[in-house]
């Protein structure tokens, strides 16, 4: 073998070993940066050693964990706010439905009261007309007590008619949430008793 060739081969082989050592050092450094390698054990000394700072992989993992936790918390808060809004909307709809139902019931009660008052007014008017016709038919033979009773019957029947009209005017049909007022209820009761008394006196006048 020639001496020049042997010398060139040893130089190339030495450069190859240096390159291989450099690559191994770079790989070891990369593993340590990624947190994959095990750190060398600390030297046994009398001083207290501190933990080595986390590697780049640990920092990235901690940041990703914080980002995921923050995203989950934001999604949970958003869902909670949406559920609270839906619950509030359902409660408002239920309250409005209950108010509408109560208003409708009061309106129906007011309509029934108006119908009853109209019936009382019509009966009072018919009774008054009948008592007038009866008085005119017995005008020649009517005695003084009969005339007094018929006059009282007229007053009571006219009072019942007026009380029924007053009660109808006091029922606020444009605002069904209020219904019949206490004044309208009292006037309706008065109209009923006046009507009964007037018809009774008209019937009594027939006995004289």
Image: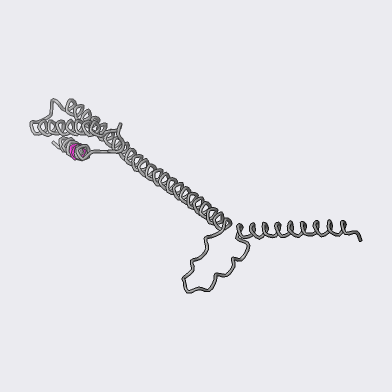
Position of 203 with respect to 50 (left or right) is left
Identified at 48% across, 66% down, the residue is 50
Residue 195 percent coordinates (x, y):
20, 37
- Span highlighted in magenta in the image: 190-194
Give the residue drawn at x 63%, y 62%: 36
Q: Residue furthest front?
A: 3
Q: Quadrant of the N terminus?
A: bottom right
The answer to if 120 sits in the magenta stretch is: no
- The percent coordinates of residue 106 (x first, y second) are 32, 40
Tell me if residue 139 comes above or below residue 55 in the rendering.
above
Give the quarter of the image for residue 138.
Answer: top left
In the rendered structure, the answer to whether residue 11 lies left or right of residue 135 reads: right
Which of 78/38 is in front? Answer: 38
Q: Nearer the viewer, residue 31 or 79?
A: 31
In the rendered image, residue 125, in percent from the top left (x then y), is placed at: 23, 30
Q: How many marks?
A: 0
In terms of image quadrants, where is residue 22? bottom right
| Furthest residue in direction right, as rendered | 1
Residue for point 63% across, 63% down:
37
Asked whether 36 or 68 is in front, the reply is 36
């Amino acid at each position: 073998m020639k001496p020049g060739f042997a010398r060139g081969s040893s130089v190339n082989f030495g450069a190859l070993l240096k390159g291989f050592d450099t690559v191994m050092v770079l790989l070891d450094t990369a593993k340590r940066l990624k947190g994959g390698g095990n750190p060398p054990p600390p030297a046994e000394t009398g001083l207290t050693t501190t933990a080595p700072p986390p590697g780049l992989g640990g920092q990235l993992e901690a940041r990703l964990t914080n980002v995921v936790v923050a995203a989950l918390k934001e999604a949970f808060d958003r869902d909670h706010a949406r559920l609270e809004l839906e619950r509030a909307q359902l409660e408002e709809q239920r309250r409005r439905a209950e108010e509408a139902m109560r208003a409708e019931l009061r309106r129906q009660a007011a309509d029934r009261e108006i119908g009853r008052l109209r019936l009382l007014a019509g009966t009072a008017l018919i009774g008054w007309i009948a008592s007038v016709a009866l008085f005119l038919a017995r005008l020649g033979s009517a005695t003084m007590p009969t005339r007094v009773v018929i006059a009282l019957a007229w007053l009571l029947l006219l009072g019942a008619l007026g009380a029924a009209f007053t009660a109808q005017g006091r029922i606020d049909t444009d605002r069904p949430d209020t219904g019949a007022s206490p004044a309208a209820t009292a006037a309706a009761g008065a109209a009923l008793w006046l009507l009964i008394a007037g018809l009774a006196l008209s019937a009594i006048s027939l006995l004289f």
